[in-house]
Amino acid sequence: MSVRIPATLIPGDGIGPEIVDATLAALDALDVSFDWDIQQAGLAGVKSAGDPLPDAVIESIRRTRLALKGPLETPSGKGYRSSNVRLREAFKLYANVRPARTLIPGGRYDNIDLMIYRENLEGLYMGYEHYIPIDGDPEAVAIATGVNTRQGSRHLLEYAFEHAIALGRKKIAVVHKANIMKALTGIFLDEARRLYKAKYSDRIELQEVIVDACAMKLVLNPWQFDTIVTTNLFGDILSDLVAGLVGGLGMAPGANIGADAAIFEAVHGSAPDIAGQGIANPVALLLAAAMMLDHLKLQDKGDRLRKAIDATFNLDQVRTGDLGGKADTKTFTAALVARIRNEG
C-alpha cells in the first residue's frame, strides 16, 4: 500500500475550488496519494473564521510543511493584509519560483523556456512606509524604505544556483539596478558575484543585467535568457512579463520555497467574474501541482502531468475559452485525465 503524503489544501476564492477539483482529479489519475487537510483562507477564511488567514491554516502548514493553494482574495478596506504575504512571512518562504514554458506553439513568441527566481521576503515589499505632513496635507510626502540583507540575498541565490544546475540549466542572469540603487540592489549583485566565484563558476554561466535593459531584452529576444534571479519587486514585475510571453497568468504556476515549508499555487487571481460558471482554465494550478511533485522527488509523475497537458492542448486540441477553445473546465479535465491514464 502506497504511503499517503500529508499536505494542506486551500481551495481559495472565486474559481479556486473549480481549478482545485480539476487538479485533484489529475493527481488521482497519476496515482499519487495525498492525505489532504482542507483549510479555508482569503474571503472564505473571513466567512468561516473572521480572518483571511486563520490560525488553523498556519497550524496545518506547520504540521504538513507542504501546501497546494488556489487564488486568495484579500478583502477590500483597511485592516487586512495580503494572505499571500502573511504566508511567506510566517514560513520564511524566501524563494519564489516561476517557470514559463510555451505550451501552445504558434504564438507571437515560440519555444520559450524560462525560469524566474524571485526573492520573496525583502526589498521594497517589506512595507516600511510612512507619510510626512506639509502645510496641512497629512500625506504630502510618501516615503518607502527597502531592505535587502546579505543573508537574505544568499538564501535565494544559493537556492537559485543549485536548483538551476540540478535542472541542467546553462546560464543564470542576476538582474539588478545597482547602477542607481547602489546599496539596496548592489548588495544582491555583490553577493551573487561572491557566491558564483566561490562555488559555481565551473558549473553554470553568470550574466549580469540591469532590470530595465532586461525588460527590453525579454521583449526583443527572450531566447537569450535561460534563468533569471532577482530581488522582490523586480521579480514580481519580470515574472508577469515572462508569463505574458507564453499566454498570460492562466499558464503561470508558482512555488514558494522556504527552509521549513513549500507552498505551490496558481499565480493568477480569483477571477470572481467567472466563478461558478465552470469555464475556468485550471492549467496554472495543474502546473503548480507538477512543481509540487518535483519537490517531492516524484519528477516522473510531474513530467507525466506536463506531457499530458501538452498532449491535451496540441494533439487532442482541447482548450478552454481563454485559449481560443470551446472546452469548459470539466471537459478539459476529463480529456487531461484520459491522457494521463492512456500514457501511464
Image (cartoon, rainbow, N blue to C red):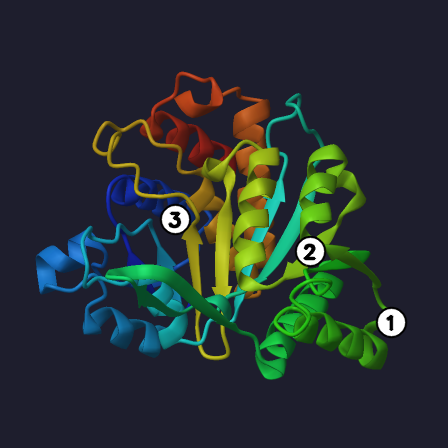
Badge number at residue 22: none
Identify the residue at image location x=66%, y=66%. Answer: 160
Q: Are marks 3 and 2 in contact (CB under 8 Å)?
A: no
Q: Nearer the viewer, residue 39 or 137?
A: 137
**SS type, badge 1:** loop
- The x, y position of residue 342, in whole percent, is 52, 34
Is 201 located above or below residue 233 in the figure?
A: below
Instruction: Name which residue type carries label 1.
Output: Ser
Residue at 61 percent across and 71 percent down: it is 184
Whole-percent x, y for residue 315 in the image? 59, 22
Q: Quadrant of residue 204?
A: bottom right
> Circle 2 sits on which residue?
228
Label 1 and label 3: CA atoms lie apart by: 42 Å
Q: Which mark is residue 28?
A: 3
Q: Decide which of tag 1 and tag 3 comes sooner along the chain.
A: 3
Q: Is residue 85 left or right of residue 95?
A: left
